[in-house]
Image: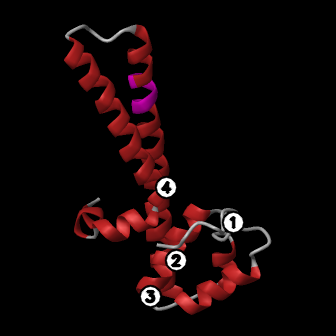
Amino acid sequence: MLRALKHPIETFRSAPVQFTGMAVNLGSASIVVATSERHGAPPNAFELSGLALNFGLVALQSVVAKSKLKLRDRLETTLGQHGFDARAMNLTTSTYCTRQAARIACENYGFSSEYEAVCARNSDIARFTWLPHI
């Protein structure tokens, strides 16, 4: 957790979809609260269910983001101890978020070109390749 506070950009880059989703859901929840406050009436059942849904989605996305940060930390430990292993990195190429976490770990240890080669070899199973790598 302390690392996330020291390196916020790297943390965001490791799980961009989850952190963006959390921001959107927190923003929409605050709009519901602000609208209710402006009218001076307590929130109705529809607004309460919207609040519950938004906060539930924030909780879910925070769990997923935590798993991506753990993946990045595990990969960095592996890269530091054993160097680059394409077999281990093959498991990270299927989804956008795991590619982002692995890409950050490889960048931190100087294995960016090797990881890009693994991603190119596994492009047939990769999903959401049209999303930009940040």
> In the image, is 71 to the left or to the right of 92?
left
Q: CA distance from mark 4 to mark 3?
A: 24 Å
Pointers 4 and 1 in contact (CB under 8 A)? no
Start and end of the magenta stretch?
51-55
Q: Is residue 84 above or below residue 122?
A: below
CA distance separating discs 2 and 4: 15 Å
Residue at screen point 52% across, 90% down: 111
Q: Give the CA distance from mark 2 to mark 1.
A: 13 Å
Is residue 112 found left or right of 125 in the rendered image? left
Which residue: 23% across, 13% down?
Answer: 39
Residue identifier under label 3: 109
State if disc 1 and disc 2 touch (CB < 8 Å).
no
Front of the two marks 1 and 3: 1
* Disc 4 crowd, CA 10 A, few/some/many (<14, 14-19, 20+): some
> Per the image, is 54 magenta?
yes
What amino acid type should be assigned to the residue bearing mark 2?
Answer: Arg
- Residue 109 lies, with reference to residue 72, above or below; the image says below
Residue that carries the numbered disc 2 in the rendered image: 103
Badge 4 or badge 3: first in the primary sequence? 4
**CB under 8 Å between callouts 2 and 3?**
no
Q: Which residue is mark 4?
A: 17
The colour mode here is: secondary structure
C-alpha distance separating marks 4 and 1: 15 Å
Residue 34 screen position, x and y as percent: 24, 25
N-terminal of the pair, mark 2 or mark 1, is: 1
Residue at image x 33%, y 38%? Answer: 27
Q: Which mark is residue 83?
A: none
Main SS type for the magenta part? helix
